[in-house]
Every structure is written in structure tokens, then in C-alpha cells.
Image (cartoon, grey):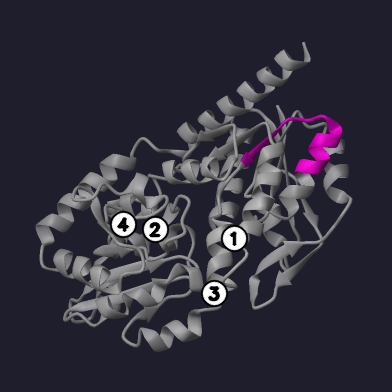
């Protein structure tokens, strides 16, 4: 198949949409298909030399107040690139701006499209502007309603989409690199550096942005013998350094360096309530680390409460603090949760999930052929 991946984000960006688009392109190449990526232009496009396929960059501007996020500008390159690639199918990754143009081009060219829902834009609108949820859902309905199939990463996301009038929704999760993220990378020297007095290491990994609610870790960080470790960057960084004075901020980490940090944690705590999936929870589980996460969105599918970790009410700092305290006092429970978490994700490789995705592509192509006949 010749597949065009139209994505709102792609490496060197570090986020769920970029990571999933990259893994999709890699898997398609491994399986003998021919992908092309269309993504917003970034300041440093040197990473494109390492991409598994050709990348077409569309002019973009940084999002005001959040320069790490870039928004594509109107461009004829999208339709031209899809046509020039002679695409059999268009894959829309987290469509909202660039993806809308990709959907329009696919419709004009008569090419089937699969839209992958990845971002709770209505939740973000609520967080950043206090309004706009209705407008966000109208835009999502427009693009996903035009697609041949929408793939949602969790049961909660499927329910949200269907409740807002979006049809043809199927569940498609995310893979995790269980060879890279593994318990055997736990490192005593790193732990001594981060916790010189033997503190329990409670880590957060992800963007530092308002919707991630990393500030909720302030109470947990005040517990005796607990050290909070924050990995990532974003506009909330300065405020979080004030809110979490005892925490260690390690900045953005990727690849083997990130896997080394994950495995060296005692507890992983995710705090954001708007995750449609939450890849970092899977990476922590693959690393053999027990997880605390809000009982909302994607983590509901990933965390088996009382077996692989603990689910807490979203936005509740006291519940989060209590959960950290429970695990801090129970090393055997932490170890049991960590083992169970690793076992739970061992079959969720990108190869398995990538083949599932190709299966969706083939079903969509067959459905189009049947309609045409």
C-alpha cells in the first residue's frame, strides 16, 4: 500500500501524536508498504534525515504561549503531496488543523481516509480558555465524520466520540517498546544521584503544561522520604519549579536515556485527566514500575487498580498523596504491582499494534471497493 500519514506533529517533537506517527511509518516500511509523512515545519528539520520515509513539511507558526507546539498554515502542499504519492489511503493522525486539509484533499481525490483520534481537544479548550468545548467537538465531528473509519485508543475515547455523534469508531490501542523499556535498566548510581538519602523516587514524565496538572504532586513531594522527579519541558516549567521546590527537574529525555530513568523510579505518577491513552503509563509498566493515575480516560484501560497500580479521583491532590504514601510504605506491594504491570504489557508491541492498524486499512479499502462495485 501507498499510505500518506498527515500528522499534526512529528519528531523532533516529543508527544503522543508524533511518537505514534513515527512508529506507524516505521512499521509500514518494515511490512513492505510505502508511507509518506506530511507534518508542520519545525525550526530544526535535521531529524527528518533519520525518518523511515520521506517527510513533506508544511509552513507553520508556533502556538502563542506554547512555542513547542506548531500549527500548520494553509498550503497547497498537502493535496499536491497526496496526489504525487499516488496514495491508496490517507492516515490522519490527531486531525484538527493540518488533518482537516488532509481530509479535504483525500475526499477531493476519492481516496479513503482513516482518522486516528488522539487528543482530548475539548478538555484542552476547557483548561486553556474555559470555553470552546462545543466548537472543538464540532470541528472533530466534521473531520472524523468525513473519514471512512475513526480509530480511538481507549474505551473511554470510543464512548466520548460516540456520545458526540461520531460514527464508524473502532478501538485501536498503542504499542510499547518492551525491549527498550524494561526493569533490568534500574540503575543504582542514578538512584544515588537523584535520592542521595535513599528517598522513594516518584516520577512524572511528559509535557509540562497546564492540562497535565503536575502541580498535584506537591503534596506527595512533602511526604517524608519521598523525592519527586519530573522529566519533560513546556510552558509550565517555571511555575512547577516553584510549586515543587524539593523536586528534581531533569528536562526533556528520550530514547535509552528515558528508559534508564523510568526503570530507576519506585513509583510512576501521571496527573493529567485528559489522556485519550497515556503512553507514559505503558512505558512505566513495561519498566516494571507501579503506576498511580487518574481514574479517567486512557488510564482506565491500562491500570488494573489494586493489581498493576492505583487509580485515584482526577484532580484530587489528597488522594494522590495518600496513594503515594500507601506505596511508599509497602515495598512488597510495589514489587508485585511492577511485576504485574510488566506482564500486562508484554504482548502490546508496536509490531502487534501495527499489524492491527494495517488490518483496519485493508478493511477500509475492501469496504470502498464493495461500495464502488
Callouts 2 and 4 close, C-beta under 8 Å? yes
**Which callout, 1 or 3, points at the residue further toward the start of the chain?**
1
Residue on which disc 2 sits: 259
Q: CA distance from mark 2 to mark 4?
A: 7 Å
Q: In this rendering, would 49 be left or right of 17?
A: right
**Which callout, 2 or 1, points at the residue further toward the start of the chain?**
1
Camera-near label (3 vs 4) is 3
User: Which residue is pictured at 37% across the width and 67% down the height?
Assistant: 204
| Quadrant including the N terminus | top right
Position above or below: 59 against 366: below
Label 2: how many residues lie within 10 Å, few (<14), some (14-19) or many (20+)? Answer: many
Camera-near label (3 vs 2) is 3
**Which callout, 4 or 1, points at the residue further toward the start of the chain?**
1
Residue on which disc 3 sits: 234
Q: Secondary structure at mark 4?
A: helix
Specify the label residue 185 is tagged with. Answer: 4
Give the magenta-colored segment's residue range: 103-115
Q: Is residue 183 magenta?
A: no
Q: Secondary structure at mark 2?
A: helix
Is residue 85 or residue 209 the one in the foreground?
Answer: 209
Amino acid at each position: 500500500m501507498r499510505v500518506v500519514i498527515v500528522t499534526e506533529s512529528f519528531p523532533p517533537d516529543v508527544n503522543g501524536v508524533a511518537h505514534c506517527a513515527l512508529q506507524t511509518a516505521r512499521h509500514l516500511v518494515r511490512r513492505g508498504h510505502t508511507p509518506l509523512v506530511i507534518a508542520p515545519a519545525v525550526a530544526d528539520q535535521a531529524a527528518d534525515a533519520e525518518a523511515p520515509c520521506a517527510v513533506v513539511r508544511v509552513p507553520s507558526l508556533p502556538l502563542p504561549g506554547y512555542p513547542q507546539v506548531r500549527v500548520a498554515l494553509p498550503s497547497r502542499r498537502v493535496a499536491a503531496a497526496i496526489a504525487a504519492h499516488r496514495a491508496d489511503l490517507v492516515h490522519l493522525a490527531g486531525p484538527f488543523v493540518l488533518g482537516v486539509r488532509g481530509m479535504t484533499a483525500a475526499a477531493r481525490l476519492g481516496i479513503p481516509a482513516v482518522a486516528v483520534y488522539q487528543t482530548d481537544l475539548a478538555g484542552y479548550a476547557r483548561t486553556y480558555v474555559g470555553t470552546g468545548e462545543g466548537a472543538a467537538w464540532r470541528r472533530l465531528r466534521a473531520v472524523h465524520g468525513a473519514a471512512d473509519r475513526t480509530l480511538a485508543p481507549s474505551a473511554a475515547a470510543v464512548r466520548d466520540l460516540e456520545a458526540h455523534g461520531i460514527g464508524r469508531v473502532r478501538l485501536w490501542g498503542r504499542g510499547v517498546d518492551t525491549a527498550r523499556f524494561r526493569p533490568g535498566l534500574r540503575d543504582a548510581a542514578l538512584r544515588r544521584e537523584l535520592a542521595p538519602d535513599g528517598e522513594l523516587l516518584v516520577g512524572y514524565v511528559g509535557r509540562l503544561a497546564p492540562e497535565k496538572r503536575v502541580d498535584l504532586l506537591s503534596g506527595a513531594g512533602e511526604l517524608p522520604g519521598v523525592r519527586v522527579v519530573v522529566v519533560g519541558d513546556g510552558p509550565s516549567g517555571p511555575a512547577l519549579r516553584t510549586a515543587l521546590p524539593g523536586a528534581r527537574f531533569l528536562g526533556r529525555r528520550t530514547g535509552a536515556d528515558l528508559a534508564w530513568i523510568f526503570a530507576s523510579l519506585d513509583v510512576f505518577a501521571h496527573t493529567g485527566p485528559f489522556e485519550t491513552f497515556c503512553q507514559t503509563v505503558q512505558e512505566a509498566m513495561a519498566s516494571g514500575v507501579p503506576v498511580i493515575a487518574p481514574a479517567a480516560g486512557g488510564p482506565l484501560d491500562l491500570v488494573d487498580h489494586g493489581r498493576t497500580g492505583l487509580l485515584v479521583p482526577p484532580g484530587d491532590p489528597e488522594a494522590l498523596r495518600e496513594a503515594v504514601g500507601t506505596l511508599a510504605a509497602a515495598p512488597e506491594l510495589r514489587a508485585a504491582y511492577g511485576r504485574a504491570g510488566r506482564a500486562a504489557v508484554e504482548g502490546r508491541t508496536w509490531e502487534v499494534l501495527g499489524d492491527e492498524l494495517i488490518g483496519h486499512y485493508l478493511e477500509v479499502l475492501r469496504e470502498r471497493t464493495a461500495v464502488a462495485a
